Image (cartoon, rainbow, N blue to C red):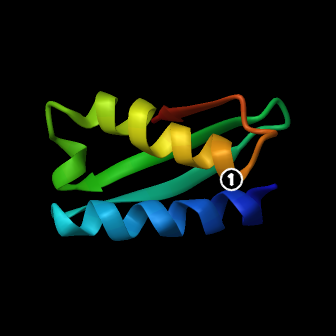
Amino acid sequence: MREAVEKALEKVRDMLAVEGGSVELVEVTDEGVVKVKLTGACGCCPMSQMTLKMGIERLVKQEVPQVKEVIAV
């Protein structure tokens, strides 16, 4: 599942790079929780939670249905 999540995050990274940010995969748990670290401009952006839930989580769940949640660490 980790490889599928990484592949989905590649699509997100292109969008985030336009704004000077990125996302790093930290861990994928057996329970389907994906832990990521927002970097660059995304790491300190006040809209990062919206980006995480409405952008990153939505796309990752769409690409990898086994994922239950995406959280920032």
Quarter of the view holding residue 33:
top right
Q: Is residue 34 left or right of residue 10?
A: right
The C terminus lies in quadrant: top left
The N terminus lies in quadrant: bottom right
Residue found at x 67% / y 57%: 5
Residue found at x 77% / y 41%: 65
Q: Is residue 69 above or below residue 42?
A: above
Query: Camera-side residue: 73 or 34?
Result: 34
Q: Secondary structure at mark 1?
A: helix
Q: Position of residue 40 (x, y in %)?
A: 21, 59
Q: Residues within 10 Å of mark 1 (few under 14, many from 20)?
A: some
Q: Is residue 18 above or below residue 58?
A: below
Residue found at x 75% / y 58%: 2
Q: Position of residue 45 (x, y in %)?
A: 15, 39
Q: Position of residue 46 (x, y in %)?
A: 14, 31
Name the residue tied to disc 1: 63
Q: Is residue 69 left or right of residue 21?
A: right
Query: Camera-side residue: 45 or 11?
Result: 11
Q: Is residue 60 above or below residue 7?
A: above
Q: Is residue 73 left or right of residue 19?
A: right
Quarter of the view holding residue 15:
bottom left
Q: Is residue 23 above or below residue 66?
A: below
Residue found at x 46% / y 45%: 56
Q: Position of residue 10 (x, y in %)?
A: 51, 69
Q: How many marks?
A: 1
Which amino acid type is shown beneath numbered disc 1? Glu
